[in-house]
Amino acid sequence: MPPYLVFTITDNQDRVVRRIYSKPSKGLNRTNWDLRYAGTSPVNGNGGRFDPFAEVNSGLFVMPGKYKVSMSVRAGGEVKELVGPTPFEAVVLNNTTLPAEDRAALVAFQQQVAELIRKVQGTDNFAGELSGKISTMMQAVHQAPGASPELLARLYTLSLKVDDILFAFNGKQPKASREENPPAPVCINERMGNIIYAFYGSTSAPTATHRRSYDIVMDEFTPIHAQLKQISQVDLPAIEAEMEKAGVPYTPGRLPQWE
């Protein structure tokens, strides 16, 4: 991997806020920071290839105040600092229609939202991957002469549970617009998306509706996460152990036993 530059931005308490990566090049160059925290949405696999310059999603706006930026070069797995922490200040432009009276409280709530985004979207992706894994396991058990029909039935039951979880996340997919769905319940991702949309480009204070939506997502997400934890950490490992004993062919994530 060729060397690349790392710009590390820290706040006034020396906590890392953001890292920006750039290719070294000759002459005078400019690198910009969009004054946002790092995004917490799921990261795609980039085709299984590590790319330090892959496009990343930014998060919500940072708190105005004093920051520092340092520049390092990463080469051969080692990092060497080229320029030490240099102070600068992020200030608010006087162009906001409804500025938050307490900007610190706004940023604190947005950080809670960002962490909820990380957990909700990550769990949704995990549920989708788990659905595919269970389907593959069902296919493998179906093809294995030594596997009992009861194994397939247990996997089918788990697949229905994961389907219900994915429905809670995504709801009914309309042909044209979500306006077709009412009076169907609002799904978790739709409610979460409304919160993200409200804050990504705004510096206004959260409304009572935003806070209520946040609480509803928390309440609905908690039991779903518990169900997926039970399925992925207890139910499936027990089934995989029986699959191995029955000589079922390899399925993703299951290491064949070797004594």
Image (cartoon, helix red, strand yellow):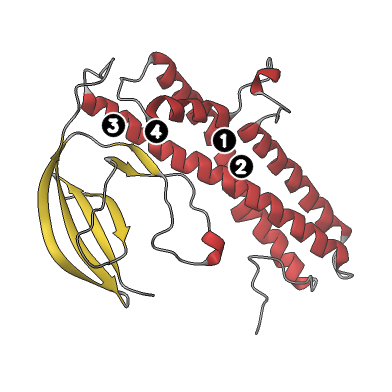
Residue at numbered disc 1? 223
Q: Which of marks 2 and 3 is nearer the N terminus?
A: 3
Q: What residue type is labelled 4?
A: Val
Crowd around label 4: few <14 · some 14–19 · many ≥20 (10 Å): many
Q: Which amino acid does label 3 sit on?
A: Ala
Q: In this view, does 118 lie above or below 113?
A: below
Nearest to the eye among marks 2 and 4: give it: 4
Residues under labels 3 and 4: Cα distance? 9 Å
Between 206 and 19, the residue placed more toward the observer is: 19
Crowd around label 1: few <14 · some 14–19 · many ≥20 (10 Å): few
Residues under labels 4 and 1: Cα distance? 19 Å
Q: In which quarter of the image is residue 204?
A: top left
The tag on residue 227 is 2
Residue at numbered disc 4? 113
Nearest to the eye among marks 4 and 1: give it: 4
Secondary structure beneath label 4 = helix
